[in-house]
Every structure is written in C-alpha cells, then in structure tokens.
Image (cartoon, grey):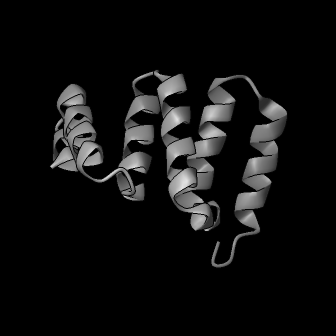
Amino acid sequence: MAKAKWLSNDTNAALRELYNCLQKDPTLVEAHILAALINCESGNVKAAENNLQQAFAQDFKIRESPVFMLMRSDIEIKQGDWQNALKTLEQTFELPGV
C-alpha cells in the first residue's frame, strides 16, 4: 500500500503506511529501505539515514544488497561526503551479480 501511495506522489500517506507497518513489525527490512528511499527523495536525508541504519540493524546481510548500497551512497552524496560515497559505489560494483 505504501509503495502504491508513493508511486501516486502521495509521499506523506506512503510514509504513514510504512510507519504503521513498522510499528507492528519493526523487523521489516523492505519497509525501512522504502522509507529511506522516500525520505531521501523528499530531502529528509537524516530520516533516510536513520531508516538505513534500522534496516542494517535488523539484517546485517543487507550490505550485500545493491539497493541498500545505492541508497547509502545517495545519502552520502546528499550529505557532501564524496569520498565515502565513492567507496560505497565501488563496493556496490564488487557485489555478486552486479
């Protein structure tokens, strides 16, 4: 439901849906990642970074996900952390299947 609302440009409703989902089950890594994406696109970089940290706390293997790594580099770029963003992107290209 959150993804549908986000795709229809209702960012606030999408974030509310995700918040409700995460209240019921905070281990939903996909919800944390989608919240990070929506927050990052909305310019709320700090919230996006927090969402990624929560996703990582729930599943350490998420670092093997290209989506997670690209989101992380996007946040680093928006924070002006160019060197870490470059390192993250280089790590992304070293992932299996990328």
Q: Is residue 35 left or right of residue 57?
A: left
Q: Is residue 17 visible?
A: yes
Q: Position of residue 14 (x, y in %)?
A: 22, 37
Image quadrant where one finds the C terminus: bottom right
Which residue is more in the foreground, 20 or 84?
A: 20
Q: Is residue 65 visible?
A: no
Q: Position of residue 45 (x, y in %)?
A: 53, 25
Q: Is residue 43 left or right of residue 24?
A: right
Q: Is residue 8 left or right of residue 77?
A: left
Residue under the point 17% across and 31% down = 13
Q: Position of residue 60 (x, y in %)?
A: 61, 62
Extreme-bottom residue of the structure = 97
Which residue is more in the foreground, 30 or 23?
A: 23
Residue under the point 47% across and 27% down = 47
Residue under the point 62% across and 43% down = 72
Quarter where residue 94 is shown: bottom right
Quarter where residue 65 is shown: bottom right
Residue under the point 82% across and 48% down = 87
The answer to whether 73 is drawn above or below residue 89 in the figure is above
The answer to whether 59 is drawn above or below residue 80 in the figure is below
Q: Position of residue 32 (x, y in %)?
A: 41, 47
The answer to whether 60 is drawn above or below residue 69 in the figure is below
Total of numbered circles in the picture?
Answer: 0
